[in-house]
Image: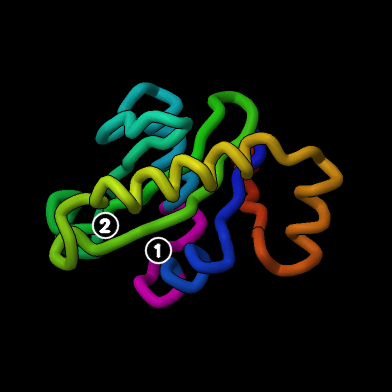
Amino acid sequence: MRVFKTKWFARFARQEGLTDDKLVAALREVEDGLNDGNLGGGLVKKRIGRAGAGKRGGYRTIVALRLDKRAFFVYGFAKSAIDNLDELELKGYQKLAAILLAFSDAELAKAIEAGELRELDYDAE
């Protein structure tokens, strides 16, 4: 599976100390059926723990996902900041998921080259 984070999410992850290893571990849990909500339109919500606080007091991530194909970390927030996305935000992220999940390999390469997406090393063990 190819895994990406958007430019916005990469900045968020860096500021909050969410390493690529933590993101990969979270996505492996999603592959095992452990997500925190199917949001529809190719989106899932996944909790990621904060150092010293665990998952409950940690972060919520929104992932555009097509299992065994591609995943895009598109949004993240601290549980203490907001509880959930509102309906308008959810619709916006569902539209973004549809676009990202439909990208061809050439479109992905362009987005990576432009710095809009960053690919994670998912298959490394």
Point 41% across, 56% down: residue:
75
Q: Quadrant of the C terminus?
A: top right
Residue 82 sits in which quadrant? Answer: bottom left
Point 38% across, 29% down: residue:
40
Point 39% across, 23% down: residue:
32
**How dense is the environment of label 1, judged by Cα within 10 Å: few (below 14), some, or many (20 and up)?**
some
- Point out the tag, 1 or 2, that comes first from the N-terminus: 1
Q: Tell how many labels.
A: 2
CB contact under 8 Å: marks 1 and 2: yes
Point 68% across, 35% down: residue:
102
Q: Which residue is mark 1?
A: 18
Q: Which residue is mark 2?
A: 59
Instruction: Read off the magenta span.
Output: 14-22
Residue type for callout 1: Leu
Q: Main secondary structure of the magenta part?
A: helix
**Of the residues tagged 1 and 2, which is closer to the observer?**
2
- Residue 89: percent from left, percent from top: 34, 53
